[in-house]
């Protein structure tokens, strides 16, 4: 069993389950539709409650749905790995790949690449659709403006890494409910709880959280409370790497 064949096996597993492409399609649709609606609802006279910082302009509006897309992509990642434990299929998988670890790496790589490419396309669609209603607005931007391609690609990279993190959580916890709870709690609840900590601790901890690191990847300009794009990427990769390492350790040392 070669590495390429394990990759092909995980690719087949992903696309042969109806919930995979349906959930992925819904996540991308949410990203594009919410971004387009936010752009259409923008009113320069009042700024509206949905207006992003001027520096982010049309990109900030186009990526309004990133949080919702991250939940969909992350949950699908959990299902992709933990689902095998709930059905018992993991025993057949590990019987075919007795070294075990190639299964985890292949599953993460397959889903990470798919989620990155598809959601980056969704972010581009949201930006282009939003641009149709922001032609004459003061925050209008074009795809050729400095930082715009990086921010849109950053959205895809962020969502792809969240998907890989979901796969790692599912493999580590071996529970669909547990993996989803850990993912949604870290993305949505922990940032709010961090604000209750002393300012010195919150200021140091909050930028390292996955959701804030994702904001650093998609921001056009660096702002207070956010890491630089490179540091944000490093933080996200760190979350994925540590969780995958823990999942790999459990996979090799305990029975499925």
Image (tube, rainbow, N blue to C red):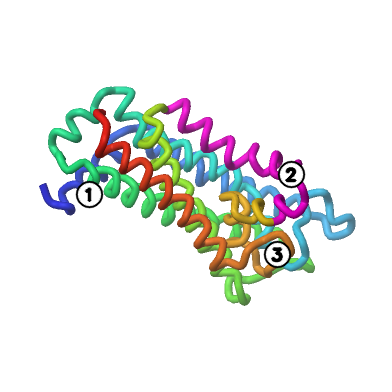
Number of the front mark, 3 or 2: 2
At horizontal 46% and vertical 52% (from top left) the residue drawn is 161
Report, in whole angstroms, how far the alpha carbon at label 1 lies from the one at label 3: 38 Å
Q: Is residue 132 visible to the viewer in this orientation of the structure? A: no
Sequence-earlier tag: 1 or 3: 1
Bin the neighbour count of mark 1 within 10 Å (Cα to Cα): few under 14, some 14-19, many 20 and up.
some
Q: Give the residue furthest to the left.
A: 1
Sequence-earlier tag: 3 or 2: 3
Residue 61: image x %, image y %? 69, 56
Q: Give the residue furthest to the right.
A: 46
Residue 56 disc label = 3
User: Is label 2 in a helix, a strand or a loop?
Assistant: loop
Residue 59 lies in the magenta stretch: no
- The image quarter containing residue 16 is top left
* Residues shaded magenta: 176-203
Residue 240: image x %, image y %? 44, 50
> Compared with residue 187, is residue 35 higher up or lower down, i.e. above or below?
below
Majority secondary structure of the magenta segment? helix
Q: Please name the residue that numbered disc 2 is placed on.
A: 197
Residue 7 disc label = 1
At horizontal 37% and vertical 54% (from top left) the residue drawn is 113
The C terminus sits in image quarter? top left
């Amino acid at each position: 069993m070669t590495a390429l064949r394990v990759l092909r096996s995980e690719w087949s597993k992903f696309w042969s389950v109806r919930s995979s492409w349906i959930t992925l399609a819904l996540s991308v649709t949410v990203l594009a539709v919410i971004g387009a609606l936010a752009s259409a609802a923008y009113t320069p006279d009042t700024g509206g409650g949905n207006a992003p910082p001027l520096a982010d302009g049309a990109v900030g509006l186009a990526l309004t749905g990133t949080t919702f897309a991250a939940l969909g992509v992350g949950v699908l990642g959990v299902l992709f790995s933990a689902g095998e434990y709930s059905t018992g299929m993991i025993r057949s998988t590990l019987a075919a790949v007795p070294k075990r670890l190639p299964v985890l790496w292949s599953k993460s790589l397959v889903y990470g690449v798919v989620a990155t490419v598809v959601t980056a396309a969704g972010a581009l669609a949201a930006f282009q659709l939003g641009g149709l209603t922001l032609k004459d607005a003061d925050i209008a931007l074009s795809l050729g403006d400095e930082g715009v391609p990086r921010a849109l690609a950053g959205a895809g990279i962020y969502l792809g890494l969240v998907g890989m993190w979901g796969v790692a959580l599912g493999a580590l916890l071996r529970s669909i409910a547990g993996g989803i709870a850990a993912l949604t709690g870290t993305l949505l609840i922990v940032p709010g709880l961090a604000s209750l900590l002393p300012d010195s601790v919150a200021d140091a901890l909050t930028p390292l959280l996955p959701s804030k690191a994702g904001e650093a990847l998609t921001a056009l300009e660096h702002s207070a409370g956010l890491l630089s794009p490179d540091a944000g990427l490093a933080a996200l990769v760190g979350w994925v790497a540590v969780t995958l390492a823990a999942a790999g350790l459990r996979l090799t040392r305990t029975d499925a």
